[in-house]
Amino acid sequence: MADYECITYEVADGYATVTLNRPEKRNALSRPLLAELEAALWDADDDKSVHCVVLKGAGPDFCSGYDLAGMQEFSGQPDRPRRGTKTIDDDSWHLERGAQRLRVFWDMHKPTIAQVQGRCLAGGTDLALFCDLVIAADDALIGFPPARNLGSLPNSMWLYHIGPQWAKRLTMTGDLISGADAALIGLVLKAVPAELLDAEVTSLARRLSLIDADLLSSNKRVINMGMELMGARTLQRYAAETDARAHRAPGTQEYFDAVRKGGLKGAFADRDRKFGDPRVRVREPEVRDDNGQVITP
């Protein structure tokens, strides 16, 4: 079994558990983490003792998104020019290459369960929504805030979980939805109290482990093929290309200027301040004051 630095990997009771292990960074997705994650998932898919995989995050959060500081560094050799992100094609190339790592959730034969607690933001939603099943804590917060000023979503599985209207409502505003409300609209399979989350996911993983792995694979792949016939795989390629174009939008350029002047944390704070409370309401009225705070009826 490989030694990992950014994740942990263990097999027991017929299923594998892969844990994002950068709690000090809220499990932000770095290039090394994504490489290790891909390797671990293929290892689990190859292991005959594994029937399904649980994906979770160490610490209070599932995943805060991509490690933007780390992603700005591109590897290369001094004597060989490498792609940056100056042109749309270069930018699109990097986005597509990154997306290919996440496609392992789709292409591997065995089912995956995302166990979502705390914040599941931006790239964290990419991980969760590529999994076959998502179970969240009631108080988890799920969303893609970078859609407010950093381009469009480079991966787009939202439509296939919640339909066009809720997909637009959440991705156009970058607002967040609680785990409990996410379950109401089908973004996650189920939401449970945070203290019961681990037991809930463990119970489902053990239940799946009672089924022959080849049968699990057959049923997963039939349903995934149905989604492919609805354009799911093609849409991911289009989403990456569109994000590269969206990086050239005036609003996105303003964000890059803000990062250069005040750093990532300051740019995020300036972006989100005017939105006030970031949470959407599914059943309750959502009337807001001038500061973006929901007015209680």
Image: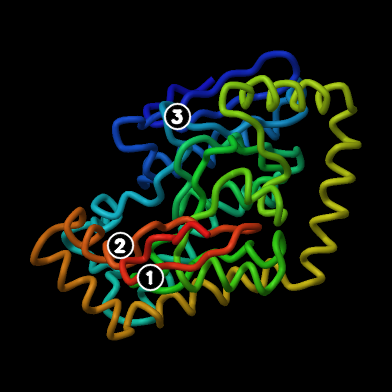
- Is residue 76 visible in the rendered image? The answer is no
Which label sits on residue 272?
A: 2
Q: Is 13 placed left or right of 69 in the picture?
A: right
Label 2 with label 3: CB-CB less than 8 Å = no
Labelled pair 3, 1 in contact (Cβ < 8 Å): no
> Toward the viewer: 124 or 282?
282
Q: Quadrant of residue 274?
A: bottom left
Q: Earlier in the sequence, mark 2 or mark 3?
A: 3
Q: Residues within 10 Å of mark 2 (few under 14, many from 20)?
A: some
Q: Residue at x 58, y 47 (%)?
A: 128
Where residue 75 sits in the image (x, y, percent)? Answer: 27, 55
Question: Which of the labelled discs sits on residue 7, or is there none?
Answer: 3
Residue located beneath label 1 in the image = 148
Q: As displayed, is residue 181 above or below residue 196?
A: below
In 3D space, how far apart are the residues under numbered discs 2 and 3 (Cα atoms)?
A: 30 Å
Q: Are marks 1 and 2 in contact (CB under 8 Å)?
A: yes
Mark 1 neighbour density, 10 Å: few (under 14) some (14–19) many (20 or more): some
Can residue 20 be spotted in the picture?
A: yes
Question: If you read the primary sequence from the N terminus, does the residue marked by circle 3 or circle 1 appear first?
Answer: 3
Secondary structure under the numbered disc 2 in the rendered image: helix
- What residue lies at 54% left-to-right and 53% top-to-bottom? 177
